[in-house]
Amino acid sequence: MAHLLTKSCFGRGVTAAPPCSALLRAYSAGNADTEHLHKSIVPTMHFQKSLPRLPIPKLEDSIKRYLNAQTPLLDSEQFRKTEQLAKSFQNGIGKQLHEELVLQDKQNKHTSYISGPWFDMYLCARESIVLNSNPFMSFTPDPRPEYNNQLIRSTNMVVSAMRLLKTIRAGYLEPEIFHLNPAKSDTQRFKKLIRFVPSSLSWYGAYMVNAYPLDMSQYFRLFNSTRLPKLNRDELVTDENGKHLLVLRNGNFYVFDVFDKDGNIAKASEIQAHLQYILSDATPAAEFPVGYLTSEERNTWAVLRQKLLENGNEETLKKVDSAVFCLCLDDFSIKDHIHLSHNMLHGSGMNRWYDKSFSIIMTQDGTAAVNFEHSWGDGVAVLRFQNEVFRDSTQRPAISPQNVPAKVDSSQAVKKLVFHLDDSLKSAISTAKETFDATMSSLTIASMEFKRGGKEFLKTQKLSPDAVAQLSFQMAFFRQYGQTTATYESCSTAAFKHGRTETIRPASIYTKKCSEAFVRNLSKHSVGELRSMLQECSKYHGQLTKEAAMGQGFDRHLFAMRYLAASKGQSLPELYQDPAYARINHNVLSTSTLTSPAVQFGGFAPVVADGFGVGYGMQDDWMGCNVSAYPARDVRQFVQCVHQSLEDIFKVLEEKSVKS
């Protein structure tokens, strides 16, 4: 299962999501239930109790993997020092920290050893969540052009999202399972049998037929949730009593109920009428759009939020925080992929509330995307959300272009939220806008599509498509800068209870050797030699991927021991003070991949000022990437180098191997 568990959600370089098998399931044609997506005979959380626990790797294995990852990044003298520090750590303070971590883990069998530290990493981070945390994923356009209308598509997506909410809370959502042998396990027969196996044993029943249930503990944070700014550490809150949708347009805030008093979804024609009312509202753009404050440094925003509360905005903020989700209606159309990426990743800031668990952004031409806050989960639930909502809204739309909005008094049903702002708050919004505009203007995005071939061809060559994509990034960076750099690829560990992510380290001695050969010495090597190097890269990348998916990387283990030492007030062990440790965690190439019929593409910002944020995807016959960078890097040249690298690789693969 490891090779498929690397399918990851575009994110900050720390996101991952497993493949959504839900999208591959046959849609229940003729479903008369308009309140739910489906009613799974296996309860949603049936496997959660018996999921295996995330293993803590052996300390000697983590140190060995750490040193392997450092080898291509260091010269011999630097490596000797790092190796000495690593061995000293392994035999000294590291051994003690590892034993304490294992003991602590045994006392907390309800969760994983990484869950608490990982939440803290996100929630204690003080930089703005815009660019530094929130990624975006754009929806594939509706296959019927007439449905790609802002009002029609918004209405259909809201209804489908509410069906998903009710399906999750009723326990009707099909559990997320990775099927290695779908003919045996993705069947009605298997489902009818497994539902009678007690939850404490159900995972083992699935395992017997090569099916791997995945962790679904993050799903409850999907709806009615927000990240509240607090001094030093933010807080996640979920209020399932909220029955209203938050809608933003021109920086103005609106809410209306999407559920009636009995918990039924509001009529689609009424939702359509309310959205039409908001889209027709002639109120000018907000002079002081409060949404800008959610883009601020978190402690600054925490102080300002307290001022908002003291200024009589408690009820208004409560409405924002408890809304099922946020729908951002933008009054313009998308010009091209680059415009789409900028708008969905950050936008102008006026018409966003970045703290919500997720927002659907819908432009005038019906282009839609999800922008999500990252601390509550790793995109597993967001990808499932996107898959389910896309499928339901396109295959079972609540309204068609021929539908007319209900004749209801939307002026009564839709409530415009008004913020009370004193001069200091107005000044703070202006300052936040200036900071926001300056930061966003420094981000450049470029994209590339390689149409010479994709997954199908690479598989005929017995090469991992992901390994080839990662090699193309290594070769591109080497071509542009003449060196190998710290690289991060996110990998889901959702096969384990409360698993989060592990890191694949794609920069290796094999990719370095291959990059040098292709970029500097192409004419000196035979086709056979070059193909052999490609095979070595693919084999090693496959090994790293499998280890990471099985919780056998080194990054999370070292991170957890560092966190443990800090929590005990111990001085930082020397290993973590090594410049080489800082360098390998300064991820110049932050990469994440995703392939789903519901998702057109996605993107995120670099995680360091001199880095690249590389979102990429692979189809059967093409490969593409969407890359971001700040002024320290030339992103357009980088994507050209990626394209050139793929051209060189495919040229070698297409040639018949000849002896040198």
Image (cartoon, grey):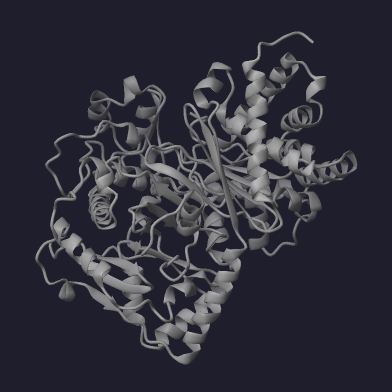
Q: Residue at x 71, y 41 (%)?
A: 477
- In the rendered view, tell whether residue 27 sits above or below residue 190: below
Question: Does the rendering let one see residue 232?
Answer: no
- As drawn, the residue found furthest toward the bottom would be 423
- As drawn, the residue found furthest toward the top would be 659
Viewer-proximal residue among 649 and 69: 649
Q: Position of residue 566 (x, y in %)?
A: 67, 61
Q: Is residue 189 left or right of residue 226?
A: left
Q: Residue at x 25, y 58 (%)?
A: 151
- Quarter-of-image position of residue 242: bottom left
- In the rendered view, tell whether residue 134 sits above or below residue 184: below
Question: Does the rendering let one see residue 29?
Answer: yes
Question: How many tags in the picture?
Answer: 0
Viewer-proximal residue among 602 and 578: 602
Quarter of the picture containing the C terminus is top right
- Quarter-of-image position of residue 69: top right
Q: Is residue 518 left or right of residue 327?
A: right
